[in-house]
Amino acid sequence: MKGLIFREMYLAKKNYIICAFSLLLVVILEVMVRLSINFGNLSKLEPGSLNDTDNITFYLFIFGIAAASYAVFLNDGAIVMSDIKCGWQTFSFTIPVSETRLVLVKYVIKLFWLVLIFVFSVLNALMVCGISGRPFDDLLVKVLLGIFALASAITFVYTPLMLKFRSSGVVSGIFMALFALVYFGLMSRVMAFLEEHGSEDEDAAAEALTAWLKDIANTVKPYVVPAGILLVICTFAAGFFASVRLLKRREK
Amino acid sequence: MSDYENAIEIKELTKRYDGFTMENISFNVRKGSIMGFIGQNGAGKTTTIKSILNIISPDEGSIKIFGLDSVKDELAAKQRLSAVFDELPVHDMLNARHIDRIFRDIYPQWDSQTFFNYTDRFSLPQKKKVGEFSKGMKMKLQIAAALSHNAELLVMDEATTGLDPVVRNEVLDIFLEYLQDENHSILMSSHITTDLEKIADSVSFIDRGRLLLTGFKDDILDSHRVIKCSKSDYKDIDSEDIVSARLTDFGAEVMISDRKKCEKKYSGAVMDHTTLEEIMMFYVRQNSSNGKTKEWS
């Protein structure tokens, strides 16, 4: 198993080095922006603009870094594709390693990268909070966990889809269609809400919408962490077993 | 470890595809021997080899590797074999050292020393990415890896195809060296019959999914002859003695498969020695005429 882990590491090395450099650049940038907000040119902005800049950069730097966890499925997809292209996938059937083990290696590696990026995201969030003097509160933790859970879910179901369709284009298409469905579903619900509450008084409608969204947020809040954990576990198990099954299913 | 006398035993292997059926393929590869598996492109060589390696599931039939069922005892069987394909199944960004590091933990009997001895012998750089290797270098690297975990059986699918004659000869020499150990066996599919003529002990010949011929190479070469005669003399030869016949403006070339019988029967006829390539060609022509006629031009 160690040999296969090394293989995956070698293949992912270049992508993760690029990813690490990009993250480092973002961290340097965020430190510079925070310093500028506190002591530099940005501190000379009007209080309203300064507040907006402060908010935007705060969330951008925290969630932007956390979004790097989505690189894991892209990298994994690239490896699966090149495994198919170079013939490794066929060759792997000739080595004395079971399909379960082959898939297990992939999932262990995915989990490793996801946890590594999550830990880095948390450390980064702690640093940004420290510099900007904001609390590292419960909401922030939940949002980070949410990003991590979603990235994990996508990563875990990506492999069996790649093994099934053998095309990153098709799999990306499926995900894009799924996101479009969720996005337009939400948007149509928001539009319906605004229509119900009239559009003559825009401020009142906006207030009603904010209250409605807060209400939804408060309703789902207690379930975010258990739902996230459940999502990660379920997608891990489903993705893992589906991948093993697909690998075991020999060419007809 | 069993004392099984056959490295591979294939019984009535059948695989049906849309537009292609491979039927009742049966042959054995004896331990300590090299079998050439000949056939033109699309004859069913790769399907047979993929079935042996359990890459595809056959519809019928059984395959045993050293007496082990290729499906039920898959992992035990695969500890003892190495597969070599026509392309190196390794990512371009890896190098020989990476390959050593990866296979060291995959094959329990992997020997890094042997592997690097082969890479040195083949003058393969250890740190250069395989993506920068020539086709010959890639094949040598694949063979080096295949020979470095004490595999008792090499299964090769068109491994020498596409290599230049110098590299091919070098590779064939290594196979002969490998066969010095009487426990080692090779199944080598190829449509380059001259390679197999050099090194094979036995030959199986497949065409359009049917096994046309299997046996010791020397016996096959000894029993087959080409009779070159006029068209009128050709008419005197019994159809049952003929594999197939090439008719030209100048006469006929007739392939026969039972030299001894034909020597007695057609005592005045000139019978020329033949090659595996010629035998393959005459059998293919026989097979393509659907039994209606054995003549072609």
Image (spheres, rainbow, N blue to C red):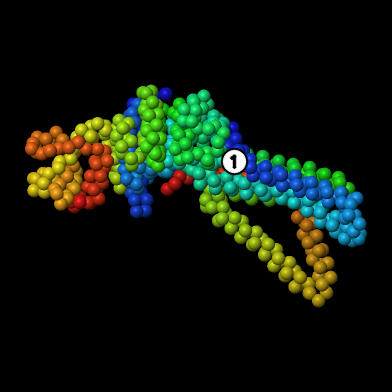
The residue singled out by tag 1 in the image is A11
Query: In the picture provided, is B88 more to the left or to the right than B188?
Result: right
Which quadrant of the figure has residue B243? top left
| Image location of residue A109, percent across then percent down | 63, 40
Q: Residue at x 33, y 28 (%)?
A: B33
Marker count (numbered): 1
Mark 1 packing: few (<14 Cα in 10 Å), some, or many (20+)? many
The percent coordinates of residue A50 (x first, y second) are 88, 58
- The answer to whether residue A194 is visible is yes
Please name the amino acid that badge 1 sits on: Leu
**Residue nearest the viewer, comparing A120 with A157:** A120
What residue is shown at x 31% (from left), y 39% (from top)? B193
The quarter of the image holding the N terminus of chain B is top left
Q: Chain of mark 1?
A: A
**x and y percentages locating residue A44 in the rendered image:** 91, 57
- Is B151 above or below relative to A100? above
- In this orientation, does residue B212 appear? no
Out of A103 and B84, give the one closest to the viewer: B84
**In the image, B249: left or right of A52?**
left
